[in-house]
Amino acid sequence: GAVVSQHPSWVICKSGTSVKIECRSLDFQATTMFWYRQFPKQSLMLMATSNEGSKATYEQGVEKDKFLINHASLTLSTLTVTSAHPEDSSFYICSALGWGGPTGELFFGEGSRLTVL
Amino acid sequence: GNSVTQMEGPVTLSEEAFLTINCTYTATGYPSLFWYVQYPGEGLQLLLKATKADDKGSNKGFEATYRKETTSFHLEKGSVQVSDSAVYFCALIRNSGNTPLVFGKGTRLSVIA
């Protein structure tokens, strides 16, 4: 089946640094990818919708200057957490829409756990 | 707007017990419905789905039926195993455009031997 890969799977950084997380669709082209954030013992919160070749659409309350999303190709979307702070520590998950349109399957990456010291 | 409501956990069951996790939804139109599972330390995996009313999704002994009249998609399994211990998320997606999944808050299931 289709696979979505995230990298890195975990990262520890110092406060004030920036961290980039990559999301790749390995065997299909994904015009649309979604970025979610998961707090401990809570559900996934949609952060933004990433469309290839255009600006990402951010959900209300998500700082677009803080969480930079780039979807430069049909197989790669990146999320950069700029000037990270401890409250940005979280589990970030991307997903990509596979074939079959909106009723088709959304494939999820393995997630990236960010810890900001 | 679209939303999903799941029964709150945690749910603790003995091995071979019957499982039901309730899920109801609110949506415009007729969405597709999903159950995802997240095992400890892992990402999300699709467990089953149903794309129209009265469809039944099934996988690994789990079942859920899309009930339009009650706007529900309850997850059931006749005999749970310790390996079923995980967090289960009910989700929906609108059947138009490239829209994201809307998730319920998740229900943590612990199965004890």
Image (spheres, coloured by chain):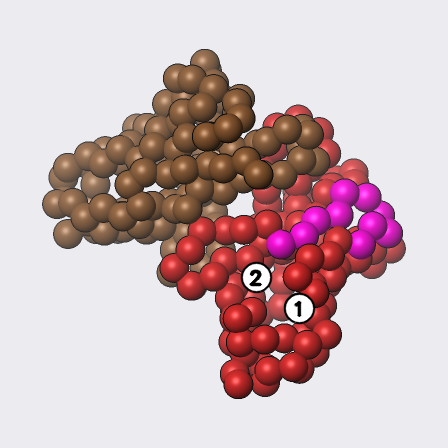
Chain colours: A brown, B red
Q: Position of residue B78 (x, y in %)?
A: 72, 74
Residue B52 on the magenta span: yes
Taking the image as shown, residue B94 lies to the left or right of residue A46, namely right
Q: Position of residue B84 (x, y in %)?
A: 56, 69
- Residue drawn at x 50%, y 28% is A27
Residue nearest the viewer, comparing B95 with B56: B56
Taking the image as shown, residue B41 lies to the left or right of residue A59, namely left
Tag of residue B88? 2
Q: Secondary structure at mark 2?
A: strand
- Residue drawn at x 87%, y 55% is B69
Task: Return the residue at label 1.
Answer: B21
Residue A37 visible to an observer of this rendering: no
Quadrant position of residue B76: bottom right
Q: CA gap, disc 2 to disc 1?
A: 8 Å
Mark 2, chain letter? B
Instruction: Sort mark 1 into few (<14), some (14-19) or many (20+) by Cα contacts within 10 Å.
Output: many
User: In the figure, A17 relative to A74: above or below?
Assistant: below
Mark 1, chain letter? B
